[in-house]
Amino acid sequence: MTDELHTDRLLLTPLTLDHVDDYFRVYGDLRTWEHLPGGVHTSRGESARAIERSMASRREFGFGHCAVVLREPVGDLPPGSFIGSAGAAMLAFGAWNLGYRFAPEAWGHGLAGEAARVCLDAARDTRPEAPVTARVLANNPASIRVLERLDLDLVWQGASSVAPASPDDTTHLERLVFADRPLDDATRDAVIALG
Ligand SMILES: CC(C)(COP(=O)(O)OP(=O)(O)OC[C@H]1O[C@@H](n2cnc3c(N)ncnc32)[C@H](O)[C@@H]1OP(=O)(O)O)[C@@H](O)C(=O)NCCC(=O)NCCS
């Protein structure tokens, strides 16, 4: 089980329901969903359910998503500021899904890269047999850049449908799939099917 993680500037602790107000401030902010506006959280309950899924991943597989807090001032933000979340959750088919979302006030300081690096290492240490995957929309260059700077390779790029089958379906959008190792066909197809 991975508990606290540190980087030079960041403290990452397991997300819990104590973080729901801070988490909703970030996940309910449309600016953090510029590339996928339909994903914005519209209620505190939606954020609570996302945190509960992260807690379940951590209970069952030893790692999940983390609350990310500054250890030192960055820009106008003081130490102790909650800036967002980063981590990895185990997918149903045995691969990690790496992800992050930060408050706009924290962008542009290299913090996402710093957090993603330590989360990638933690996911690998926790379940070395599980590939680490990450999905990003092609219209999100900042996030693509974060993934490119990690020890991950692009394993697929494209759109896998012509039109969404439901409001949540993103398979028609061009996206990139990164992974920390070659994926077998079944795993690759399962990641692509997630949209
Ligand atoms: C994506 C996100 C996490 C990046 O956070 P960040 O702390 O600013 O990221 P970093 O500073 O570590 O790195 C961003 C990189 O993208 C680059 N970048 C930023 N905006 C860019 C743009 N419009 N075009 C190209 N590159 C861009 C930066 O220059 C930097 O690269 P560099 O270090 O090589 O210069 C943040 O913008 C965010 O939370 N966005 C909303 C949520 C989101 O998109 N999450 C990811 C979903 S897959």
Image (tube, rainbow, N blue to C red):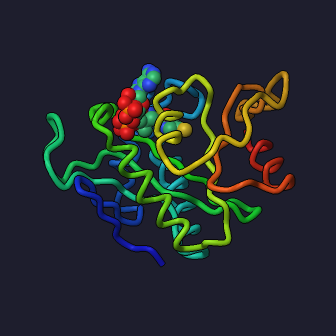
Question: Residue at the location (52% across, 42% down)?
Answer: 147
Question: Residue at the location (48% across, 78% down)?
Answer: 1
The quadrant where ligand 1 appears is top left
- Residue 10, given in percent of the width and then of the height, sits at 27, 55
- Residue 49, given in percent of the width and then of the height, sits at 54, 55
Judged from this view, the residue extending furthest toward the bottom is 1
Q: Nearer the viewer, residue 176 or 16?
A: 176
Q: Quadrant of residue 183?
A: bottom right
Residue 41, visible in the rendered structure? no
- Residue 127, given in percent of the width and then of the height, sits at 60, 73
Q: Nearer the viewer, residue 108 or 43?
A: 108
Relative vertical location of residue 161 with respect to residue 187 in this rendering, above or below: above
Q: Quadrant of residue 124?
A: bottom right
Q: Which quadrant is the C terminus positioned in?
A: top right
Numbered circles on residues, count? 0
Question: Residue at the location (45% across, 59% down)?
Answer: 119
Q: Nearer the viewer, residue 143 or 59?
A: 143
Q: Is residue 95 left or right of residue 41?
A: right
Relative vertical location of residue 118 with respect to residue 44 in this rendering, above or below: below
Residue 27, visible in the rendered structure? yes
Q: Is residue 133 left or right of residue 94?
A: left
- Residue 176, given in percent of the width and then of the height, sits at 66, 35
Question: Residue at the location (47% across, 46% down)?
Answer: 100
Q: Is residue 104 left or right of residue 81?
A: right
Relative vertical location of residue 174 with respect to residue 168 in this rendering, above or below: above
